[in-house]
Image: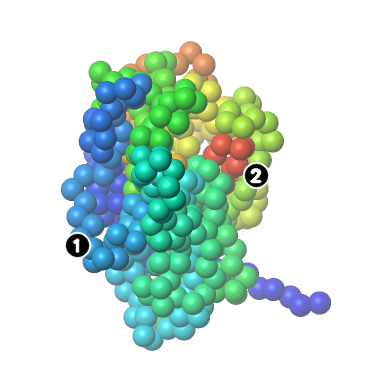
Amino acid sequence: MRTVTLRRVVITGMGAITPIGNDVNTFWNNMKAGMSGAGPITKFDTTEFKTKFACELKGLDIDAFIEKKEARKMDTFTQYAMVVAQEAIQNSGVDLEKIDRSRFGVIWASGNGGMQTFEDQIVEFTQANFVPKFSPFFIPRLISDIAAGQIAIKYGLMGINYCTVSACASSNSALVDAFNYIRLGKANMIMAGGSEGPITRAGIAGFNALKALSTRNDDAVHASRPFDKDRDGFVMGEGAGAIILEDYDHAIARGATIYGEMVGGAMSCDAYHLTATHPEGLGAQLGMKEALADAGLQLEDVDYINAHATSTPLGDVSELKAINALFGEHASKLNISATKSMTGHLLGAAGAIEAIACIKAIQDDVVPPTINTAELGEDIPAGLNLTIGKAQQRVINVALSNTFGFGGHNAIAAFAKFKG
């Protein structure tokens, strides 16, 4: 029987565009400072909408990254993917001419794919009295896998290439898959991440219909308020995050800068409800337990959990119940924070930017804060350090990133400080 030796997997590149910064360093500095990315929606007229605000990107010039002719062939979620892919490649210092690009893959995530493209084309179709004059780029702009393809085409990456779709767990699913392929020796490098462009009329109206979005229109800046007694739903966000995972030996051989290490990952399912989390967080608990087992870690090894916590009445509570149930006495000794209070919820891209937050937190030994939480809800378990109000200094050797999605999907990634 063949014996497989699992390889170490390190992080050698990152890229981010978020509502609080259009590169990794700006994003991280603003996150540590507790900046809110929320404000009035500028992309369309919100007069008839229940929710009139979101966490939009600010000041991003797509023309500086993609030629106009090429950009017109892409939905916004793909454009965002191309921007962060460029930063990640540059950040990694990789010379693409000196590596085997047949062993450099792309696993990209999007929970919704080309929402803006679909909306625009269907509106045009109906306005044309249902005469089918669709753009030849309708399908290539729409499909969720196209961002992975576009990244590969630009950089000549011929390795593993596909997309993951598991709602708001999508980009953590991509990270876990990439981690497993590399440690099994199936690739030397994989760019994993996710992008989302959901701030559209259909996106906002659709989530409004589910009663998932906050309607705090008179105080958008403070609307994303995880764990607060007055939380009333999540705030939509947009953007992308890219992480280059690499075989440790390959990274050392090319003299790469190593930012951290991915040490484990797991996926599970609530098997409970289409949109609601399990009230006791059973699926989340299973996912965290399996991620730690996969990494060979003990409960007390965990210093920080970047919570999925979206600022919804049910989801925030079930996640904390899961943490309490799994970690027991150690739950009160670790830090938990909900960074969606600053970025909003980037849906399928959330896991990627929150993984970057975990990696930077480990590097700097800083826990980013949970902002906007004025008074904890009575249903919130007591005794937990939710990092309310401002960042906290502490040594962080291990961090977990939790993501949960409609359909009951859970994906958890475990990161550790790189120690050679």
User: Residue sitting at 26 percent across and 38 percent down?
Assistant: 43
Q: Amino acid at mark 2?
A: Ser
Residue at 39% from the left image edge and 16% from the top image edge:
230
* Vertical position of residue 276 compared to residue 97: above or below: above
Mark 2, residue position: 268
| SS state under label 2 | strand
Image location (x, y in percent) of residue 139: 46, 57
Is residue 109 shown left or right of residue 275?
left
Q: Position of residue 340 (x, y in %)?
A: 38, 36
Q: Quadrant of residue 63?
A: bottom left
- N-terminal label among 1 and 2: 1
Q: Is residue 410 visible?
A: yes
Q: Amino acid at mark 1?
A: Ala
Disc 1 marks which residue? 64
Within 10 angstroms of label 1, few (less than 14), some, or many (20 or more) residues? few
Q: Quadrant of the C terminus?
A: bottom left
Q: Position of residue 175 (x, y in %)?
A: 51, 57
Crowd tier of the residue under label 2, counting other residues whose Cα lies within 10 Å: few below 14, some 14–19, many 20 or above: many
To which quarter of the image does residue 201 belong? top left
Res. 255 mark = none
